[in-house]
Structures are given as C-alpha cells and as structure tokens.
Amino acid sequence: MSPPIRSIPNTAATNADFEFAGLQEAGNYRRALAHTFRIYLHGRVVEIGAGIGQMTREFRALPEVTEIVAVEPEARFVAQLEMFLPQSAIIHGVSTDVPASPGWDALVSINVLEHIERDQEELQRFHQLLASKRGHLCLFVPARPEIYAPLDRDFGHFRRYTRPELRAKLKAAGFTVEKLYYYNLPGYFAWWLSFCILRRRGFSVTAVRFFDRFIFPLSFWIESRLCAPPFGQNLVAIARASTEVQNRTE
C-alpha cells in the first residue's frame, strides 16, 4: 500500500462526475484504450466498474463484441449509465454479482482494481468468471507508487502498481500473463508535476483537452508502434485465465 499522505478533504470528491471529468474531455485517450484491448474483446464481454459508461460505449461499438454487460456498484453512476446507454445490459453491483455461467470471453477492468483493498481476491473472482472459456482479462490500472498523490486518495485509490507486483498478483490468481507493460510516459510526468509537486486536487478541462489533442496521440503512436516505455502513468495487462489457480506466486 502507498505511504500515507497528509491532505485536507477535497469537497469535489463528493461530485458523482469527479473521477470521470477528465475522461470526458479525452476522446483520443478513450479510443486508444479501446484500440489497445480490441483484439481480445469478442463474444460475451463484461466490464467491471463501468462508471457512467464512457468506455462501455467504445467497447459496445467493436464488431466482434456480441454482448456486453456493464457492472457498476454506485447507484448514482448507474442512473447516469442507464441514461447514457439505454437498452444496455447493466448490473447494479460488483464482480460477485456477475453470474459465471455460461461463461465470459473477456472481462475489462479500467481504473477499478486500485479502489479495492483486497485486490487479490478480486483478481481471483475475475479468474472464476473467465475460467470456463479461458477468457482474457483486459486490465488497466494506475502505476508507480512514487507518484501516489493527494488526488489518488481523493479518488479512493489504495495503491498505484508496479509491474512486478501486478504480474505476481495475476499469476497467483491463476492467470497466464500475455502482455504487461507501462503506458503513457508523458502522463507520468504530467501527473507528478500537477498532483505531486503542485498538489492540485482536480483536473483542468483546458489542460486535459490540450494533452489529449496534442501530446497523447504522438506518445500513443510511439508506444504502440515502436516500443513500450520503461515506466508510465498506467499499466496495461492482458492475461488469460488458466484452468487451475496457482497456489503460490512464482
């Protein structure tokens, strides 16, 4: 767990759209995430922690996805999700409320695992949902504990992950890790400056829009076509459910 950070309460954190405000302005970022997971998303897909459906809409548009179920525990977000994506399958609950039968081809979890204190148990539940079809887990989490900021605490983040830590937890949950890499190198420095050094407690719409339009597209092209960065703001994991859960971390 990240070290304690002294901070004052952030009243903006009570706003239902607090954590989604930045993503709302980041169209290129959303499309890039959908592209990152696209080849693993087909058939029956469940999204754990769908929020207000910003990414659900991207996934639903993928041609190989025949069914997508959005799972969200917060009633205030579910209400927005229902308005944002009418006629979509929605479960007001958590991963344990999702039926494992008849099985899932893929499970998507974006910026959710860090909110769960007992994250190892959550990964094991993900494995149970995917095991019958040996489906893929498409996981996206915040990275690098050294940039854990007051804003992370406002978001309700228990941690930011390192690559070795996440790999070990995935293997212990029974997954075979196919890809695991850092993502968004410029975002690492932007987060560090804005929220660790300047200790800002919210997103600037103008700054997010500028980053999404002019900085992120180039960095994503480089990272996705040339090489993954040595560190970054986030981690991307693609893992496949194996038939048996490992009893120890290798």
Image (cartoon, grey):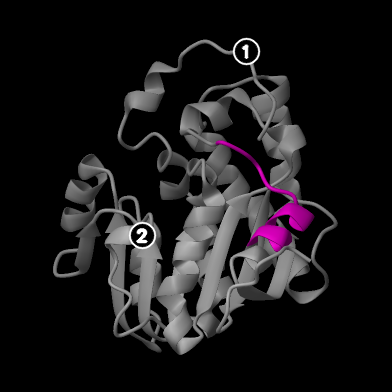
Query: Tag 2, which secondary structure?
Result: helix
Q: Residue at x 53, y 78 (%)?
A: 136
Amino acid carrying label 2: it is Ser
* Magenta-colored span: 158-169
- In this rendering, the answer to whether 136 lies above or below 144 is below
User: To which residue does mark 1 refer?
Assistant: 6
- In this rendering, the answer to whether 39 lies above or below 146 is below
* Res 111 visible: no
Q: Which residue occupies the foreground of this view, 188 or 105?
A: 105
* Res 28 visible: yes
Query: How would you rate the neighbour count of disc 2 (Cα within 10 Å): few for under 14, some for 14-19, many for 20 or more?
Result: many
Could you tell me residue 195's position as x and y percent?
Answer: 64, 27
* Quadrant showing the N terminus: top right
Q: Residue at x 26, y 45 (%)?
A: 77
Could you tell me residue 44's position as x and y percent?
Answer: 35, 83
Query: Tag 1, which secondary structure?
Result: loop
Mark 1 or 2 closer to N-term? 1
Q: Which residue occupies the foreground of this view, 242 or 221?
A: 242
Q: Residue at x 43, y 38 (%)?
A: 19
User: To which residue does mark 2 refer?
Assistant: 95
Amino acid carrying label 1: it is Arg
